[in-house]
Amino acid sequence: ARTLSRLRKEFQRSSFTSSFTTVEEWLKSLDLVIYSKNLMDNGFDDIDFLGGNILEEDDLIEMNITNKEHRQKILESCHSLP
């Protein structure tokens, strides 16, 4: 049962990420497209480079993303990216 659960989560993760080709599309899906310029201006302009826990809360604060809930939503979604 654990293996099936793990496979299901992996499938959901890959389905989630495969539907986005740009950072802007990804942020739109989170209802946070207002931050696309913040990310793009700071070098986060490729969806392929947002996964792998590369983005941290301090980075988002430096990008002037001041809303804590928005930062958490972005970070949680980043963790789902490959």
Image (cartoon, rainbow, N blue to C red):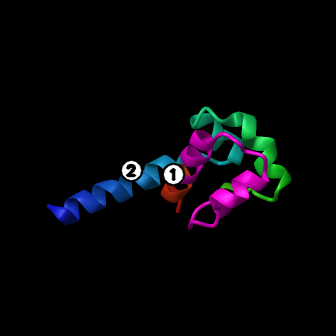
Horizontal side of residue 10 vs 29, given as left or right: left
Q: Nearer the viewer, residue 11 or 26?
A: 26
The number of discs equals 2
Label 1 sits on a secondary structure element that is helix
The mark found on residue 12 in the picture is 2
Which residue is the site of mark 1? 76
Identify which residue is drawn at 57% across, 37% down. 30
Q: Which residues are magenta?
A: 48-76
Could you tell me which quadrant the N terminus lies in? bottom left
Horizontal side of residue 75 vs 9, given as left or right: right
Q: Is residue 46 visible?
A: yes
Label 2 sits on a secondary structure element that is helix
* Residue 45 picture quarter: bottom right
Identify which residue is drawn at 72% across, 52% down. 61
For marks 1 and 2 on the same chain, the one whose residue lies earlier in the sequence = 2
Give residue 78's position: percent from left, percent from top.
56, 55
Question: Which is closer to the viewer, label 1 or label 2?
Answer: 1
In the rendered image, the vertical position of residue 28 relative to residue 5, given as above or below: above
Amino acid type at mark 1: Glu
Amino acid type at mark 2: Gln
Report if residue 50 lies within the magenta region. Answer: yes
How packed mark 2 is, by other alpha carbons closer than 10 Å (few <14, some 14-19, many 20 or more), is few
The alpha-carbon separation of the residues under discs 1 and 2 comes to 14 Å
Q: Is residue 45 visible?
A: no
Give residue 35's position: percent from left, percent from top.
74, 40
Q: Nearer the viewer, residue 59 or 26?
A: 59
Identify which residue is drawn at 56% across, 67% down. 52
How packed mark 1 is, by other alpha carbons closer than 10 Å (few <14, some 14-19, many 20 or more), is few
